[in-house]
């Protein structure tokens, strides 16, 4: 019996070994890794007191949704003061660019017309008396007086025409107008700056994302650049895994890999986005009987946003070449 049982036992062990080898020899390797994320930390651009926090951890927000508000009393006063200075500068510029009132211009036009008529009448009388002077019907004294009157009337008409032209022109000189235009531009820029500063007190979400965490409470004074909350957009979720040097040559950026984890739905995949140029020692949390190399290379893969939303940062995963998932 022992002679018969021993060959049968050896045969059974051999068959089991062949079956195990066949089941594992053709399978693709699996690399251990974990889910990671690139968080968007939202902080104020100005130091101030936090008045309200409009979101909580776990909230889903859309782009443009209100996140938090700071005290804006001083900024509103600065904005209103800048707006008042701009209105004052614009009013002064309008006054310098505006001509005289229409009634004053009409009166000047009438005065000019009267002076021109008087000038023409005196000129005609002068011409007639100069003819009479040749015959002795007019005296030299009369002609000389009319010549003086004609010159005076022409000068008065010319002065009235210049006055009318001045009344039709802007009241300010060109240099004054140019200087005031510069003042208006300066005040307009100051108003834009004040409005921007006021807008910074009311922060909205730059992107649709999950509110991952909050770091402050209303009433606290937060310095500029200190994060108040962090956002996690689904496109910022990635998988980090490690491969030995023996398989590094077979991987490249853009290559798709299958992602598996406990409880994850089938079909999760991602595209390799980064391959570390330098090796590193095997992290203590990454261990496997099929991976005993001391040095490994970090690889990053990014799933599509709709699939990335199903993964949680810190979650352990197995990564395989995509063909393994297809088989």
Image (cartoon, rainbow, N blue to C red):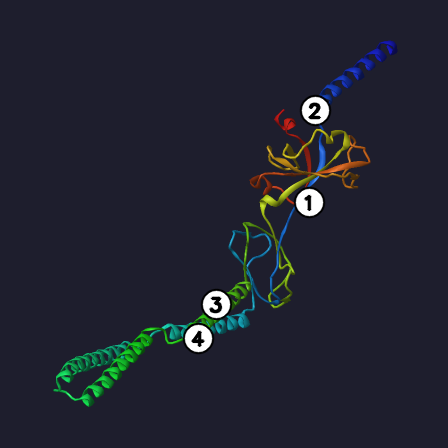
Q: Which mark is residue 27?
A: 2
Q: Residues within 10 Å of mark 1 (few under 14, many from 20)?
A: few
Asked whether the beta carbons under mark 3 and mark 2 sit within 8 Å of each other, the answer is no
Looking at the image, tell me whether mark 1 or mark 3 is earlier in sequence order.
3
Q: Quadrant of residue 261?
A: top right
Rendered view: 256 above or below 111? above
Looking at the image, tell me whether mark 1 or mark 2 is earlier in sequence order.
2
What percent of the width, then of the height, locates residue 128?
14, 81
Looking at the image, tell me whether mark 4 or mark 3 is earlier in sequence order.
4
Q: Which mark is residue 185?
A: 3
Q: Element type at marker 4?
A: helix
Front residue of 244/327: it is 244
Q: Nearer the viewer, mark 4 or mark 2?
A: 4
Rendered view: 120 above or below 269? below
Q: Element type at marker 3?
A: helix
Residue denoted by label 4: 88
- Mark pair 1, 3: CA separation: 54 Å
Residue denoted by label 1: 314
What percent of the width, then of the height, locates residue 122?
19, 82
Q: Which residue shows up at 62% across the image and 36% down it?
A: 270
Q: Element type at marker 2?
A: loop
Q: Quadrant of the N terminus?
A: top right
Q: Element type at marker 1?
A: loop
Q: Which residue shows up at 71% across the image and 31% down it?
A: 30
Looking at the image, tell me whether mark 4 or mark 1 is earlier in sequence order.
4
Q: Nearer the viewer, mark 3 or mark 2?
A: 3
Asked whether the beta carbons under mark 1 and mark 2 sit within 8 Å of each other, the answer is no
In the orientation shown, which residue stands out farthest toward the front? 135
What percent of the width, then of the height, locates residue 189?
50, 66
């Amino acid at each position: 019996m022992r002679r018969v049982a021993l060959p049968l036992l050896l045969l059974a062990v051999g068959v089991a070994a062949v079956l195990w080898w066949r089941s594992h020899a053709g399978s693709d390797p699996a690399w251990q890794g974990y889910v990671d994320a690139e968080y968007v930390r939202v902080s104020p651009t100005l130091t101030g007191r936090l008045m309200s926090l409009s979101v909580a951890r776990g909230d889903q927000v859309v782009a443009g949704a209100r996140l938090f508000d700071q005290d804006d009393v001083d900024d509103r006063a600065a904005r209103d003061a800048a707006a008042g200075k701009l209105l004052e500068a614009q009013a002064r510029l309008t006054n310098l660019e505006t001509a005289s009132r229409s009634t004053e211009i009409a009166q000047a036009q009438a005065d000019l017309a009267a002076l021109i008529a008087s000038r023409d009448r005196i000129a005609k009388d002068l011409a007639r008396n100069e003819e009479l002077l040749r015959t002795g019907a007019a005296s030299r004294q009369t002609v000389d007086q009319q010549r003086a009157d004609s010159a005076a009337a022409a000068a008065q008409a010319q002065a009235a025409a210049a006055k009318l032209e001045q009344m039709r022109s802007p009241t300010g000189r060109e240099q004054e107008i140019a200087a005031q235009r510069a003042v208006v531009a300066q005040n307009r820029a100051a108003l834009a700056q004040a409005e921007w500063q006021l807008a910074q007190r009311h922060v909205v979400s730059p992107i649709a994302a999950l509110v991952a965490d909050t770091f402050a409470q209303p009433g606290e004074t937060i310095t500029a650049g200190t994060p108040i909350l962090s956002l996690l957009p689904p496109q910022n979720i990635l998988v980090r895994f490690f491969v030995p040097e023996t398989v590094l040559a077979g991987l490249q950026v853009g290559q798709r890999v299958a992602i598996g984890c406990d409880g994850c739905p089938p079909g999760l995949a991602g595209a390799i986005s980064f391959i570390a140029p330098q090796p590193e020692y095997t992290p203590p949390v990454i261990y496997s009987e099929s991976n005993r190399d001391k040095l490994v290379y970090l690889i990053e893969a990014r799933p599509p946003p709709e699939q990335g939303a199903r993964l949680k940062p810190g979650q352990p995963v197995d990564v395989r070449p995509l063909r393994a998932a297809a088989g």
